[in-house]
Structures are given as C-alpha cells and as structure tokens.
Image (cartoon, helix red, strand yellow):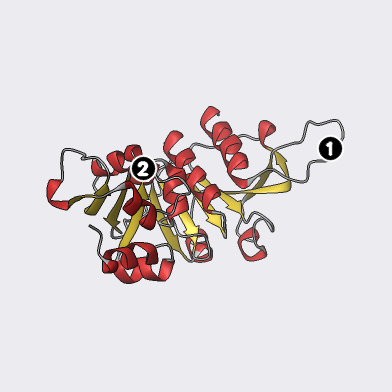
C-alpha cells in the first residue's frame, strides 16, 4: 500500500524545484520504463500493477486505484517509476550539435530529443530558460530517447562564443536550406516557439537558414519548432 509520504513525494516531482531538491524524476508506462531500466540511469523505485520480473528490491506492486493517485496521466499506464537525475556529462561537440534558445513547450522538447536520437545527434544544449528535460511531459514525449541523448543546460551565449565550428540559426528570412551547402560539423540553433532566436544569440549566428514556404497563398506564419528541427536535421544529414 502506498504511504502518504510516498504519494506526497511523487506528486511533488511535477515541479522542477522538487525534482532538483529530491534528485528524482518520474517515468510512466511499461515501454518507457523498460527502456530506462536497460540504460545507465539508476532506478530508485518502481510502482506497478504487474511485476516487471526484475529489480525486485525496488519494485512495489500497487492497485490501479493507487496508481491513479500518483499518475500524471489522464489514463495511467500500469506503472510509474522514480529514477535518479544523473550527473551532467561533458559536451563532446562532435559532428552536429543542436542548441535550443528558450524552448518552453514540454512536448516540443521531448520530440526534439527523439529527433536527436533518430538522427544520431549526441549533444543537445539548452539555454537555462528552456523547459526542464526531466519534466514528466518531456520524459513521456521522448519515449526512451532521453537515455541516448546528452542534454545540457548552460549559458547559451557563452557556449556559442567559444565555438570554432559554424553556427547555424533557423530564421524566417534566412537562406533557403535546400540551396545551402551544409557541413558535417556545426551547431544548429532553434528558437523560442513565439519569438524565435533572441537578439543576443542572433548576433552569434554564422549562417541564417530557413525552410521555404511552398503554399500558393504563403499564409502560414511559421512551423512548429519540433517540425522545423526535423526538416533541418534531415537536410544536414542528407548533405
């Protein structure tokens, strides 16, 4: 049976300050939890309505009603686990690096982490105002890719100032990406959902690139940042 202290701890982890205070983050769903169990991440406790068959010392069998009390999902998915937040890793800055300037939507960040995993991007660097990668909604959207992408939070301006490789930025007025020669090594900066790349970061961009609109009316204001990231990464990898 779940104790009041366990329920309080788990539900508090919806907020970043408590994740940092306790050093844990929440993962939900059998498939995603199974992926994280096979990674280097350390399991703290697993609450499940059916046994995983391993990690028994950390496994607690609970009822569906109890799972509903601690789940952040509208429809709980049989299991919820607490993992320890890992220590930050060194940024390798090899090949292509993706950088995010103040991306706020958890779904967008989770999708971008999945895209980095898909396209073989090892490092994703984020401004300190970018949404926390251990936010439950981000973790859910990554579908396990959080284990294979090194996500770092830092002063983005300082990071870009130190780069000797080209820095590309996504802008509406940039050069047509389909006509741009793209290198194998560089930094691709993607901006905030509403405001794009900030002026401070814009001043550090080596090359502005854009995805052209092909619609007859040219009426669409912009692309979702995760969608734009997918298109640009595809072009970088194709070149």
Looking at the picture, does residue 28 appear above or below residue 6?
above
Which residue occupies 69% across, 32% down?
Answer: 179
Quadrant hosting residue 32: top left
Find the residue positioned furthest to the right.
217
Residue 180: x %, y % from top left: 65, 35
Residue 110: x %, y % from top left: 48, 47
Which part of the image, by quadrant, shows the C terminus?
top right
Measured in 3D between alpha carbons, the distance from the residue under mark 2 to the one under mark 1, in whole angstroms, is: 41 Å
Q: Which numbered dot is residue 72?
A: none
Q: Nearer the viewer, residue 37 or 124?
A: 37
Q: Nearer the viewer, residue 61 or 58?
A: 61
Provide the residue designation for mark 2. Answer: 29
111 left or right of 53? right
Which residue occupies 52% across, 53% down?
Answer: 106
Provide the residue designation for mark 1. Answer: 218
- Looking at marks 2 and 1 on the same chain, the residue that comes earlier in the sequence is marked by 2
């Amino acid at each position: 049976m779940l104790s009041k202290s366990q329920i309080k701890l788990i539900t508090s982890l919806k907020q970043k300050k408590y994740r940092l205070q306790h050093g844990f983050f929440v993962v939900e769903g059998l498939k995603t939890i199974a992926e994280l169990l096979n990674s280097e991440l350390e399991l703290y406790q697993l609450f499940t309505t059916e046994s995983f068959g391993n990690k028994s010392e950390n496994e607690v069998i609970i009822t569906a009603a109890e799972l509903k009390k601690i789940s952040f999902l509208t429809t709980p998915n049989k299991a919820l686990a607490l993992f320890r937040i890992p220590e930050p890793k060194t940024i390798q800055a090899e090949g292509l690096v993706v950088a995010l300037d103040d991306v706020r939507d958890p779904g967008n960040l989770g999708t971008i982490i999945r895209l980095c995993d898909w396209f073989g991007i090892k490092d994703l660097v984020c401004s300190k105002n970018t949404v926390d990668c251990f936010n439950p909604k981000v973790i859910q959207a990554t579908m396990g890719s959080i284990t294979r992408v090194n996500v770092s939070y830092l002063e983005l301006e300082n990071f870009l100032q130190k780069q000797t490789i080209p820095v590309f930025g996504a802008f509406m007025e940039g050069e047509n990406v389909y006509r741009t020669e793209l290198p194998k090594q560089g930094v691709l900066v993607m901006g905030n959902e509403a405001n794009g790349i900030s002026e401070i970061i814009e001043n550090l961009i080596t090359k502005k690139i854009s995805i052209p609109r092909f619609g007859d009316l040219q009426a669409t204001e912009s692309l979702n940042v995760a969608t734009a990231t997918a298109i640009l990464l595809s072009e970088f990898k194709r070149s």
